[in-house]
Image (spheres, rainbow, N blue to C red):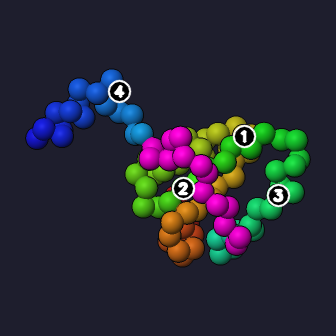
Amino acid sequence: AGLFAMGMWRDNPNDLPSTFIGQPAPAVPAAGLPGIPALTAADFRTGQVTVLNFWGSWCPPCRAEHPVLMEMAAQGVRIAGFNIMEGPEAGAAYLADY
């Protein structure tokens, strides 16, 4: 009950803080998910701004931001995603579902 109360009286109770804020970015995986080509360093030398998103199907904030990223992509924003901390099958299944 105490944790619930603390959560409700935060500055923004709808905020989903990331544990990665202020931390170095995770290593870029060498292989892409099944059926999705892997990104290379050359993909980031196009002069186009790219939003990099490190995500996992197990991550609640990642699931919450997914529709926003899809909307940004539909508006022409280049999004590159890196599935982390799980097997490629789980990441591919999540993308197939969402």
Q: What residue type is labelled 4?
A: Asn
Residue at numbered disc 1: 77
Tell me if residue 29 is in the magenta stretch. yes
Frontmost of labels 3 and 2 is: 3
Q: Is residue 38 above or below residue 17?
A: below
Magenta-highlighted residues: 18-31
Q: N-terminal of the two: label 3 or label 1?
A: 3
Residue 85 point in image, percent of width and height: 51, 66
What secondary structure is the stretch in magenta mostly built from? loop
Relative side of 63 to 34, left or right: left
**Residue depicted at x 42% and y 61%:** 58
- Alpha-carbon distance for marks 3 and 1? 19 Å
Q: N-terminal of the two: label 1 or label 2?
A: 2
- Alpha-carbon distance for marks 1 and 2? 18 Å
Frontmost of labels 3 and 1 is: 3
Q: N-terminal of the two: label 3 or label 4?
A: 4
**Residue depicted at x 50% and y 70%:** 86
**Residue depicted at x 54% and y 46%:** 23
- Alpha-carbon distance for marks 3 and 2? 19 Å
Frontmost of labels 3 and 4 is: 3
Q: Is residue 14 above or below residue 63?
A: above
Residue 12 bears which disc, if any?
Answer: 4
Tell me if residue 81 is in the magenta stretch. no
Label 2: few (<14), some (14–19) or many (≥20) C-alpha neighbours in 10 Å? many
Label 2: state its secondary structure: strand
Residue 41 bears which disc, if any?
Answer: 3
Circle 3/circle 4 CB separation < 8 Å: no
- Alpha-carbon distance for marks 4 and 1? 27 Å
Residue at numbered disc 2: 55
